[in-house]
Amino acid sequence: MGAKRVLLIAGGTIGGLGAVLSITPPQFGSGGSLGGLSGHTLGGGTSTPAPTTPAPTQTQAAAPAQTQAATPTTPAPATTKKAKAKATTAPAAPAQTQAPAPVPVKAKPSGTFVGDAAQTQFGPVQVQITLSNGKITAAKALVYPTNSFRDQQINSQAIPYLIQETLAANSANIQGVGGASYTSQGWYDSLVSALAKAGL
């Protein structure tokens, strides 16, 4: 019974000490000591006092430095409408163009031109033309087949028709005369030669 009581007292004392220490923590430092054992350990030796660290002081956070807002740049003064109008309505320099070289005008031929004699099955046909300023004003057959009575009869009717067609076409673009195909072909060939000599 006595042992129980000792245990209870010891337990209560230790519990009370724990409660006191939890309310008032021991102060370790230059002036205080725990239970009067300042500088001594339980083994009897001396211990080096623990270095004291000052309690952290509450520092106020530095206010962030205020940065000055960038000053807005002032826009360049707007040009006046009058100045703009001058800039846009300034006449452009005219582009230099070279005048085309004058084309020489070819003079139209005038005169009388004789074509080469064109050979046909019944004999040669040769045409002479007269030009006035490039226009055929007259045409005639210098040579045409007259060997037989039939040649004379056919060509006496065909030559006037060939002359008429030549004057109407003012070129070698003629139709010819039906029934006088050889004379018509000879007339055409000689007419082309005469026009070539005239430069047409």
Image (cartoon, rainbow, N blue to C red):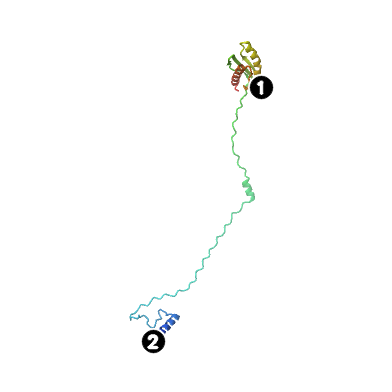
Horizontally, is 127 left or right of 36 in the view? right
Residue that appears at 64% across and 50% down? 81
Which residue extends farthest front? 1
- Identity, as a three-letter code, of the amino acid under mark 1: Ala
- Tag 2 or tag 1, which sits nearer the N-term? 2
The three-letter amino acid code for the residue at tag 2 is Lys
User: On the rendered structure, is 7 left or right of 156?
Assistant: left
Can you give x and y, in whole percent of width and height, for residue 142 in the image?
Answer: 62, 14
Question: Picture quarter containing residue 126?
Answer: top right
Q: Identify the image quadrant of residue 193.
A: top right
Q: Which residue matches tag 1?
A: 168
Q: Position of residue 136 (x, y in %)?
A: 64, 21
* Residue 190 or residue 14, whichever sits in front: 14
Kindly report the distance in space between the C-alpha atoms of the residues bearing marks 1 and 2.
165 Å
Quadrant of the drawing holding the C terminus: top right
Residue 51: assigned label: none
The quadrant where residue 182 appears: top right
The nearer-to-camera label among 1 and 2 is: 2
Does 107 sit above or below residue 151?
A: below
Q: Secondary structure at mark 1?
A: helix
Looking at the image, residue 171 sits to the left or right of residue 4; the answer is right
Secondary structure of the residue carrying tag 2 is: helix
Q: Is residue 137 above or below residue 80?
A: above
The residue under label 2 is: 4
Place of residue 38 in the rendered image (x, y in percent of width and height, measured from the top left): 37, 81
Residue at 62%, 49% (x, y): give it: 84
Residue located at (66% from left, 15% from top): 157
Q: Within 10 angstroms of label 2, few (less than 14), some, or many (20 or more) residues?
A: few
